[in-house]
Image (cartoon, helix red, strand yellow):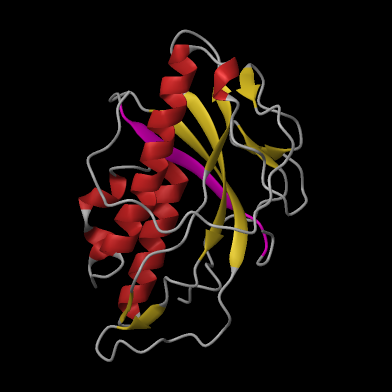
Amino acid sequence: MHMNGWGSRQRLTGMLVGGALVITVLTGCVSASQPAASSTTSSGTPAAASSPTKAASADSALPSPWASQSGSPAQQAAAADALAAYRGMWSDLAALGQTPDGYKNPKLATHMLYAPLSQWSQELADNAKLDEITTGAPSIDPEVVKVGAGAKPTQVEIADCFDNSSWPVVNAKTRKPTDNKPAVRERSEAMVTLDTDGYWKVTQQVFAQAGSC
């Protein structure tokens, strides 16, 4: 498996809404009202792994940050908690990807469920079969773009620009890169959901084509 060709990841063709890829907005959610922001910069690598957090268009531009001032305190709290969980997912992947048996580690389920958990577990398992691991961490630049309505929001949508230039796949023994393809930057979107156990987790994730942000 190579970092420039994640075989099991879905490709983004529209907005991620309720399990379907469509162009319409998420019904009943507060969305950003500011102009689209440029995606040419990245905020850096994910934060250090920690315990779980409790309770647009088809072009290359990422949506602007969620206009939190227009939301209720509950929506603001949900946005912050979901973003922390999203960052935690990437931190977990970066840490566990450095071990040959990371795909077996139950910590993978700390910040994600369903298809994202299955797909990323498979990616790490494919690495293990080829005696490969990852080093470093991806650069991400997540922005909350939609937050569910109601007294206790349970869904938050996050847009991101994923950059794997600092997250190469290497041979586990020699630590030499196993893929000489150029690094990629990809637009991605994720749905983060408040699970029944009271923790926010990434439950859907899609990616655009290389160079889409």
Report the span colored magenta.
199-209
Picture quadrant of residue 5: bottom right
Question: Residue 199: x percent and y percent?
Answer: 31, 29
Question: Residue 208: x percent and y percent?
Answer: 66, 57
Q: Residue at x 49, y 68 (%)?
A: 164
Question: Residue 66: x percent and y percent?
Answer: 59, 30
Whether the magenta-drawn stretch holds residue 111 is answered as: no
Q: Name the side, left or right, on which 74 lies relative to 163.
A: left
Q: Looking at the image, how many numbered discs can be counted on the residues?
A: 0
Identify the main secondary structure in magenta. strand
Q: Name the side, left or right, on which 58 lies relative to 31.
A: right
* Quarter that holds the C terminus: bottom right
Q: Name the side, left or right, on which 173 lies relative to 163.
A: left
Q: Determine if residue 153 is in view.
A: no
Q: Residue furthest top?
A: 151
Q: Residue at x 46, y 8 (%)?
A: 151
Q: Residue at x 24, y 73 (%)?
A: 100
In the depicted structure, whether residue 148 falls above or below residue 199: above
Question: Residue 181: x percent and y percent?
Answer: 57, 84
Q: Determine if residue 160 is in view.
A: yes
In the depicted structure, whether residue 94 falls above or below residue 204: below
* Quarter that holds the N terminus: bottom left
Q: Residue at x 68, y 62 (%)?
A: 209
Q: Nearer the viewer, residue 180 or 39?
A: 39
Whether the magenta-drawn stretch holds residue 201 is answered as: yes
